[in-house]
Image (tube, rainbow, N blue to C red):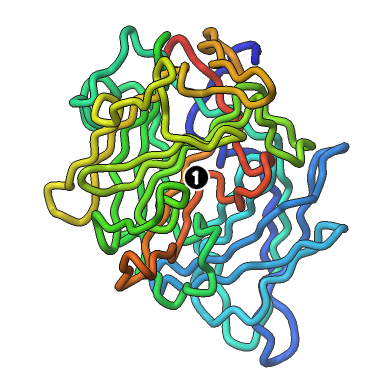
Amino acid sequence: MKGTILHPIRYGWIIGCALLTLAVCGPAGAQNITGKVTVPQGGSLTGIRVVACDPTTNRIFQGTVDASGNFTIANATAGTYTVTVFGPGFATQTFQKVQVTAGQNVTQNVTLVAATPVCIVKAAAPIPLTDDINSASFADAPDLLINTGCNIVEGLANIANFNGPATLSGRFRMKYSTQALHLAADILLPQPNVNFGSDTQLFNGNSLEILFQNDPFNATRTQFDPMHNFRVVVALTNPPRWRFGNQLEQTPQVNNAVANIADYVLVKDRPDGKGNLVRVNVPWGFFVTGGSSPAPIAAPKDNDIAAMDIRINTTVPGATASTAGRQFQLALSGMVGTVPTALIPVQFCPKAP
């Protein structure tokens, strides 16, 4: 999990070198966004996702990328789009104000570069749950934003019901100490405080997921490793519920006893009632390896490299205990989280960059 600290490190893995060309062409009636994705020599085109989002109307169109890197976002309606290209291990590229005109194609070529690790800043001491995202304790942590329709990775079939980031989005800050991983969030939700999911399916309702891998990101790893990959799911309700998962699917435990969630999780309403302010402290001892001899992982050392993702799940409208379900899942990575290549590299920085 070790690495050399990188400077500058900032929440700007979306910032990198990009070759962007725009051209208007094509036969009358065609309204496609096309282009070619190029990756560095030795890089893989597997898993790359191209999405066009109209921030005004909240329309979202997803493209397909072939083995040569060519992509097509077919039949996009006329409008002005943000086009985002996500790729495992690559810096996300985002292009604003891409104009689609009726009866014309738009061509956009993209060159991806390797992702810069996101910096998780060290805390001088464990952070109390009462210190929220706006407190001095998190002031030097970079903002991690899930604030566009392009972050939607599950629920695209329901996209006509997406009412935009003003209704569903999140801002996160993270720090670490010798004792725990500390997360603070400000999350907007269409229907706050609703989660009828079972204890093993808390994602079927308003919830927060923290996916963590305590060794460096590996773009070729196709299966989650029970010795290194972990997940914490917190139901955003009052009182909250939670679940720890990898090979060991269980409620978090301390010394073989169920942990008191109130000691580690605080979920409260935003002042405007439109979502939740969330605090989660995850002791390193909660991350228990699978295998024949389960054991807590060691706390990361300064400058270590790891990988992770943050996800927001939302309940379906009118959910009940008998009809619990997830309408949307948004991911910080912008990648579908069924494989570890959906994670993003992170670094444990002893000082803010």
**Which residue is nearer to you in this view: 21 or 246?**
246
Query: Please, what secondary structure does the residue beneath circle 1 have?
Result: loop
Kindly identify the amino acid type of the residue bearing the numbered disc 1: Leu
The residue sitting at 23% across, 19% down in the picture is 128
Question: Where the N terminus falls, by quadrant?
Answer: top right
The residue sitting at 46% across, 52% down in the picture is 201
The image quadrant of residue 100 is bottom right
**Which residue is nearer to you in this view: 317 or 137?**
317
The answer to whether 161 appears left or right of 101 in the picture is: left
Instruction: Locate residue 218, reporting x and y percent.
Output: 73, 31
The residue sitting at 17% across, 47% down in the picture is 269
The answer to whether 340 appears left or right of 262 in the picture is: right
Query: 335 above or below 126?
Result: below
The image quadrant of residue 179 is top left
User: Alpha-carbon neighbours of circle 1 within 10 Å: few (<14), some, or many (≥20)?
Assistant: many
Residue 291 visible from this viewpoint: yes
**Which residue is nearer to you in this view: 343 or 295?**
295
Instruction: Locate residue 74, reporting x and y percent.
Output: 67, 77
**Which residue is nearer to you in this view: 290 or 191?**
290
Instruction: Locate residue 32, reporting x and y percent.
Output: 67, 77
Residue 308 visible from this viewpoint: no
Task: Provide the residue designation for mark 1.
Answer: 332
Marker count (numbered):
1
Query: 79 above or below 193?
Result: below
Instruction: Locate residue 93, reporting x and y percent.
Output: 61, 48
The answer to whether 326 appears left or right of 34 in the picture is: left
The residue sitting at 58% across, 56% down in the picture is 84
